Image (cartoon, helix red, strand yellow):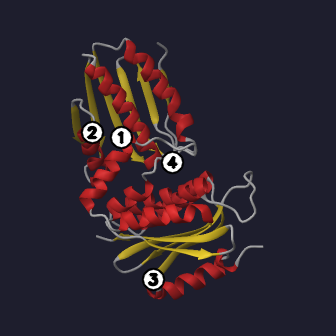
Amino acid sequence: MNAIRLIGTDDTPGVVLDKEAGKFELSGRSMPEDVVAFFQPILDWIEDYKDSPNSKTVFDFKLTYFNTASSKLLMDILMMLEEMHEDGHEVLAKWHYPSDDEDMEEAGQEYAEIVEIPFEHIAY
Amino acid sequence: MKPHIATIQGFLDFLFKEYPFLNESEINLVYEGEITHQITKAFTQITEAKLGSLEEAASVQRKVFHVMVECLQNIDKHGDKIEKDDKLPARGLFIVSKCENSYCVITGNIIDNKKVPGLKETLEIINNTDKDTLKKMYKEQIKNGSLSDKGGAGLGFIDIARKTEEKYNFHFIDIDKNVSFFIIKTTILRK
């Protein structure tokens, strides 16, 4: 599978989706002009990956800000991880948040309540 | 021609009459014009820098930033025009003011009269819903809702209400048989 690596900008997150390197990460700020156009290739990639994933998938969420339109797309990503988990693959979501950012901490807790996959919450 | 309420003067006249506390507050930003993604980015970043320089608490800075992003994106995606022309960007007004205990973000834009009853109902429901129920509404919408063709998740107003824990104050002012002017005030407590 070809890896996706995108450098973050002031309104789109940094993205790493690399099966060979075993690295899956979203970081930075997410408030794209066209949220669907930005996230669709990411969702498509994970959809393909889901059919033959690595024995363990650790997905790092290191976002500092996301708008509500992006929050829906993050949910879609987490639900695909949940499907992988249900299919018997090992999955771990690591939710990194700034230690003084209660809203970001709570967002991670809520996602963890909605999807049934192992979650780690990491303050930095 | 622009109705008076959609001009800076008309907007401010209305706001100072409706919200007398503005007389004692510091107006950080007033804008009238096109509301596009670039404008949203520019003004949210200006506000972020301004609040940073005032050494406002980080949580307050983040909330003001988020409220502005969501409110301006609402206008960018859903704002209407007096004369229908889909090629032109939506226009709108906003002010950011600072009081002793809070920041206020107030926005104004043209809205198609057909959308008024639905929006009014949504805002009234949110205003009359407690914190725990808002959380349930949010989770239900994020899990089962779908993105609109404009890329909206139907989460913005619920999310702002949850993060600010304050009620919206809003007005729909008649312009003509097709459109109204929608004003909404969001409060972010400084704590």
Side of A97 where A3 appears, left or right: right
Q: Which residue is mark 4?
A: B152
State the separation of the CA atoms marked 1 and 2. Answer: 8 Å
Indicate the amino acid at tag 2. Answer: Ile
Real-space CA distance between mark 2 and mark 3, rounded to the nearest whole angstrom: 41 Å
* Label 1 close to label 2 by CB (< 8 Å): yes
Image location (x, y in percent) of residue B149? 57, 42
Q: Report how far apart the C-alphas of labels 2 and 4 lie in the structure.
A: 20 Å
Residue B25's mark?
Answer: 3
Q: CA distance from mark 4 to mark 1?
A: 14 Å
Q: Which residue is mark 2?
A: A114
Determine the chain carrying the residue at label 1: B
Residue in front for this viewpoint, B101 or B187: B187
Sequence order check: which comes first, mark 4 or mark 3?
3
Q: CA distance from mark 4 to mark 3?
A: 33 Å
Q: Mark 3 or 1 closer to N-term?
A: 3
